[in-house]
Image (cartoon, helix red, strand yellow):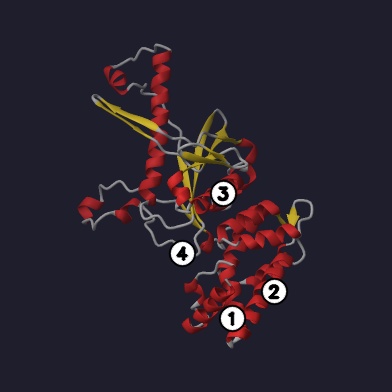
Amino acid sequence: MLIYQHEITHREKNGEEYFFSRRELEKGIIRGKIDAAKNDAVGKDFWRDNEHFADLFNATVFNGRQVLKPDKLTEMDTDVSATIQSKNYNESITRNRDVVKKMSDGVEFNILGLEIQDKTHYAMPLRTMTYDALGYIKEYNDIKKQHKLHKDSFSSPEEFLSGIDKSDRFHPIITLVLYYGDSLWDGPSCLADMMVSMPDNIKAFFSDYKLNLVQILDSDKYTFYNDDVRDVFNIIRNIYNDDFDSIYREYESRNVDIDVMELICSITSVPKLMDLCTDTEQGGTVNMCEAMKRFQAECESKGRNEGIELGIDTEKVNSIISMLEFGITKEQILTKYTKEDLERAEAVIANKN
């Protein structure tokens, strides 16, 4: 970490830099921002892999058809900033996407964008529409620059006015939103969902914009062929659903890639599980079941000791503490236990700290 007069730079292993003010440091919130930046970088690194990216899109966008080929994907600049110009109006808009790939298809190509969300965004259709529009504006400006650079002559006043030829064509952009949340998306699924109530005569002419949304909690309907991608979705979904038996059954006899576990732990906010996984590392893979058993045993031991001291039901305390440590929400816990049980477990944790 390098410290300057007015800012602090934190450089991640992937070369990305994040800047924080001294005021943020003094307020003690920089640690949380660095952790968030790390989690963001872990997710982006995982999905930048062409094998992972292709399997995600093939399973969710193309209904399992193997449309995207990993060897046909190339990384694109995530900066979609563009300048909007019209007579005396000139405005620069700065935006950066999470992951962008170009899919070659003969002499032409398509552009595929991935946006990662850990929380519901109630303006997401507008946000993705803006990203896509800026991508088209950027290509439009590039085409105009090429005509100007080559001193092309236009064949009509309409082409001159447009700055492009009648035959010029743009490349389609598809944006996918991947939602990591531990509860179902309760935001808009299209631009129309963000509008006030529209009468039919208005709705008929309204240009809608749909959200291509994928939710981890609702992902059991997809068929993934890449082991890493399948592991990410299956394990996180089962953790969110408190279905650890399924995890034990499926992963009892095989290890999980350590990069996969790093992503899972960052999404579910269970860093301690990652530490235990690292202890079981063998050639770039980890024995997740062994790590989870150690983790649960540790939680149960602490819960049992603290529970005995406080004179409460240790069996329930152990279960609830394990669920809290695994990132299970209080709302989900309350579907199986009472509010009093939860409060007792929280008292044990508070007493422990």
Where residue 4 appears, as percent x and y from the top left, is 50, 36
Residue 225 visible? The answer is no
SS of the residue at dot 2? helix
Mark 4 secondary-structure assignment = loop
Badge 3 vs badge 1, beta-carbon distance below 8 Å: no
- Sequence-earlier tag: 4 or 3: 3
Disc on res. 317: 1
The image quadrant where one finds the C terminus is bottom right
Relative to 84, is 23 above or below? below
Amino acid tagged 2 = Ala
Question: Which residue bears the numbered disc 2?
Answer: 297
Label 4: how many residues lie within 10 Å, few (<14), some (14-19) or many (20+)? some
**Type of the residue with mark 3:** Lys
Per the model, the C-alpha gap separating discs 4 and 3 is 24 Å
Name the foreground residue: 346 vs 22: 22
Q: Which residue is at 41% across, 51% downward?
A: 211
Residue contact at pointers 2 and 3, CB within 8 angstroms: no
Query: On the image, numbered disc 4 is attached to which residue?
Result: 184
